[in-house]
Image (spheres, grey):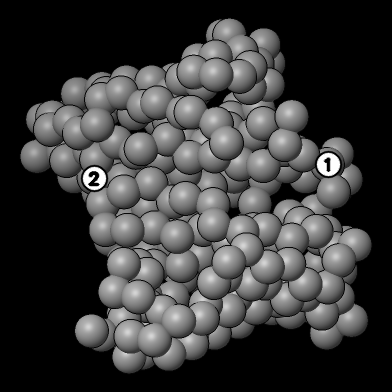
Amino acid sequence: GENVEQHPSTLSVQEGDSAVIKCTYSDSASNYFPWYKQELGKRPQLIIDIRSNVGEKKDQRIAVTLNKTAKHFSLHITETQPEDSAVYFCAARRPANSGGSNYKLTFGKGTLLTVNP
Amino acid sequence: GAVVSQHPSWVICKSGTSVKIECRSLDFQATTMFWYRQFPKQSLMLMATSNEGSKATYEQGVEKDKFLINHASLTLSTLTVTSAHPEDSSFYICSETNSAEGKTQYFGPGTRLLVL
């Protein structure tokens, strides 16, 4: 099955700096890679996602890059703000109905991002 | 986006009792729902995949007789933790896929279960 590794497990940055979180995946058939932000005690919220037919996607201060050959993808947050502090999870998913996928996501272990004022 | 609700938001029960958690999609029909468990400071662990009108598919190591899943309609899935024990205390979260958005997965607000 799919295995997703996420690094670092904790990341502390100063407000205004950039933050980068990296993930690798094992299943070359995976073609969808979402990122979720989870604040303490709350639900994970989708912040950005990328599909395997593109290499980069950007939404304001957030961007995701994908390297299919190396099987890794990264989340980039620029001009960080204290409200960006949360746990961030990456995930990977195979195409629907392939190998019993049924759209299920495999998550990384998460990165606790702390943005210091 | 999508709106997914979950009830109750938190529950405290005695050991040996059963607890039912409801997950509802409020603005779309969800043919597939997922149930996750999350222990403190850990990642989301998929427990089972729930398909409307058919039996749920459980992940390895998850006891299907202990965690009963019913997906009777396109807007409601339930998870029942039977004979709960303190080690079942966790944050249970459902999620649903929205076909209109390429099967993007949206999460419910979660249910915090504490078994005494």
Q: Name above or below for residue A77 compared with residue B113.
A: below
Q: Which mark is residue A96?
A: 1
Residue in view at x 48 percent, y 28 percent: B3
Instruction: Give the image quarter of residue A49.
Output: bottom right
Q: Which kind of residue does numbered mark 2 sit on?
A: Ser
On the image, the x and y values in percent for residue A22 come to: 60, 82
Q: Secondary structure at mark 1?
A: loop
Q: Quadrant of the N terminus of chain B?
A: top right
Q: Is residue A15 left or right of residue B60?
A: left
Where residue A41 sits: x, y (%)? 26, 51
Q: Residue at x 68, y 21 (%)?
A: B31
Pointer 2 local density, CA inside 10 Å: few below 14, some 14–19, many at least 20 = some
Residue drawn at (77%, 72%), measured in percent from left and top?
Answer: A56
Please state the chain letter of the residue tagged with numbered disc 2 in the rendered image.
B
**Point 25% across, 85% down: residue:** A116
Element type at marker 2?
loop
Could you tell me how far apart the alpha carbons at marks 2 and 1 are, in whole angstroms? 32 Å
| Quadrant housing residue A35 | bottom right
One can see residue B109 in this view: yes
Marks 2 and 1 on same chain: no
Residues at badges 2 and 1 in contact (C-beta under 8 Å)?
no
Tell me if I can see residue A23 in this picture.
Answer: no
Decide: is A4 above or below B83.
below
Q: Chain of mark 1?
A: A
Relative to the observer, which residue lies in front, B90 or A22?
A22
User: Callout 1, which amino acid?
Assistant: Ala
Residue A2 image offset from top left, x and y in percent: 72, 63
- Which residue is label 2 attached to? B89
